[in-house]
Amino acid sequence: MIKAEVHNFTLEDEDLIFDLAVHAQRPIPPNGRKDYTLTARNEAGMAEATFTILFTEPLSVESWLTENDLAGDPETIDSDADGINDLLEFATGSDPQQESPHPISFTLDEDGHYTVSYTRDLRTDDTTLTLQVSGDLIHRTNAASDQSGMVFKSAIAPAGTPVANVIFRSYAPIRGDQRYFRLISTL
């Protein structure tokens, strides 16, 4: 049985102010996930967002290393020699025993907006994944910060998998400037 409580949550923004008090107690769904739709309305209109709560046991680095017959420091070892250390393979849900494509993909649309995506295994709650943005490979900014020029767009895990596709997008066109992206994982 899962019990979730949110008490007197207040979000204040120029266009949105609301209080939320929720108490819920329900059995865990047989498939381990539950989809919800949140609808927000104000004088400017209405917006909807759908999100999924995934009920699963967390996966620790130690148990993952054991399951994959790996040893050593996952931050420094690359067991399959594909250029991605074992900790990043763990956090992104890729196979440490088999060469994997790089976990970051990006596109530049015709308007000059970058869209950057990467995978995230939602069971790996003992690691942090950080997408960094740089214009010169020297100074880096966390993509989730206001200074990055990026905005979080979504994190969606297809049915039947705990691995989500996380998407960031530049909020303004980037013309003539180069952008470099790096995904790092830390314990």
Image: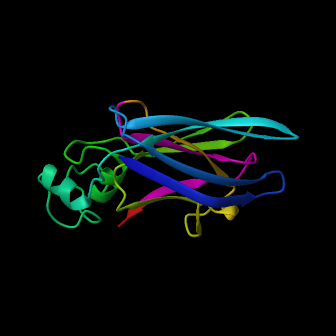
Residue 161 is one of the magenta-drawn residues: yes
Residue 76 is one of the magenta-drawn residues: no
Question: Which image quadrant: the C terminus?
Answer: bottom left
Image spot of residue 123 (x, y percent): 34, 50
> What colour-coding does the image apply?
rainbow
Front-lying residue, 82 or 184:
184
Task: Please tell me how many numbered marks the rendered image carries.
Answer: 0
Mark yes or no: residue 143 visible.
no
Image spot of residue 111 (x, y percent): 75, 36
Q: Which residues are magenta?
A: 160-184
Front-lying residue, 153 or 162:
162
Image spot of residue 16 (x, y percent): 79, 51
Q: Residue furthest left?
A: 69
The quadrant holding residue 73 is bottom left
Q: Please name the residue shown 24% across and 56% down the image.
A: 78
Q: Please name the residue shown 26% across and 42% down the image.
A: 99
